[in-house]
């Protein structure tokens, strides 16, 4: 991990903790990826040689930074969706500060609709960190867009198991290897063979 990127991640994670502690409404919180979960997706992206990485749920860009640092190593890039313009503006500034702007394309759009525009098998790693109850309505695209050997990762598998359960069932029907890694808030991981 690049030292500059790590310093920016540490700063945004600390700012998010202060910000989120002051918010009553869950949707007003930034809810950034936990550091150990970030390190996990960073490592996984490099393990599968992920070049085409898609993220749904940019927020302030913490997970985007982890993924983009991995993409710099693999020669790839991250396309990241969010529907919140203020979040996207902050994320763009943060990503530029980390020196990763060349490895990220931020799209202000619904991620489910965005996924439907990718071709079959075009995506190496899909990271879902948006509204968990929406994921099933995006079917079949989360699996259709994954290449053989590609992986889907969804955050909050342990913090919100009931909301993640429908996703897990759909993945179990379509993919052969589905498991939960107990880092951060729990990362549901599925491999397309
Ligand atoms: C948990 S936060 C993402 C945290 C981010 N991954 C990080 O580590 O910093 C969820 C984000 O998903 C966005 N979101 C919710 N539904 C969405 C959708 N259908 N398409 C794109 N973004 C969505 C929200 O605006 C919010 O910024």
Image (cartoon, grey):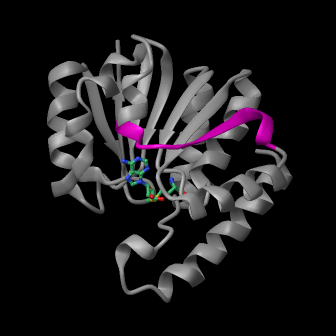
Span shown in magenta: 100-112
Residue 167 included in the magenta stretch of the image: no
Along the line of sight, which residue is nearer the eye, 138 or 176?
138
Residue 145 in the image: x percent, y percent? 39, 18
Q: Residue at x 78, y 42 (%)?
A: 100
Instruction: Determine the residue positioned at 45% across, 19% down.
Output: 118
Front residue (pair 141, 37): 141
Quarter containing the N terminus: top right
Quadrant housing residue 62? bottom right
Residue 48 to residue 40: above or below? above
- Counting from the top left corner in percent of width and height, residue 88 is at 61, 55
Left or right relative to 163: residue 188: right
Q: Quadrant of residue 15?
A: bottom right
Taking the magenta stretch, the answer to whether it contains residue 105 is: yes
Check the picture and name the quadrant holding the C terminus: top left
Q: What residue is rendered at 57% in x and 50% in y?
A: 63
Q: Position of residue 37 (x, y in %)?
A: 51, 52
Mark count = 0
Left or right: 103, with 58 as reference point: right
Q: Is residue 9 visible?
A: yes
Q: Is residue 185 left or right of residue 32?
A: left
User: Residue at the spot x=58%, y=74% of the render?
Assistant: 16
For ligand 1, the image quadrant comes to bottom left
């Amino acid at each position: 991990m690049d030292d500059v990127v790590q310093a920016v991640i540490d700063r945004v994670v600390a700012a998010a903790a202060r910000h989120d502690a002051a918010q009553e409404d869950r949707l007003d919180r930034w809810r950034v990826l936990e550091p150990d979960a970030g390190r996990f997706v960073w490592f996984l992206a490099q393990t599968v040689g992920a070049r085409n990485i898609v993220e749904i749920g940019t927020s302030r860009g913490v997970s985007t930074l982890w993924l983009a640092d991995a993409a710099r190593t693999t020669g790839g890039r991250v396309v990241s969706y969010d529907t919140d313009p203020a979040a996207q503006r902050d994320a763009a500034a943060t990503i530029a500060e980390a020196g990763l702007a060349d490895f990220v394309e931020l799209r202000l759009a619904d991620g489910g609709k965005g996924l439907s525009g990718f071709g079959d098998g075009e995506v190496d790693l899909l990271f879902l960190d948006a509204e968990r109850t929406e994921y099933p309505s995006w079917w079949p695209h989360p699996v259709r867009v994954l290449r053989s050997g590609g992986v889907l990762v969804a955050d909050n598998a342990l913090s919100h198991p009931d909301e993640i359960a429908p996703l897990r069932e759909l993945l179990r029907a379509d993919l052969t290897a589905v498991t939960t890694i107990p880092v951060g808030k729990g990362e549901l991981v599925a491999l397309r063979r």
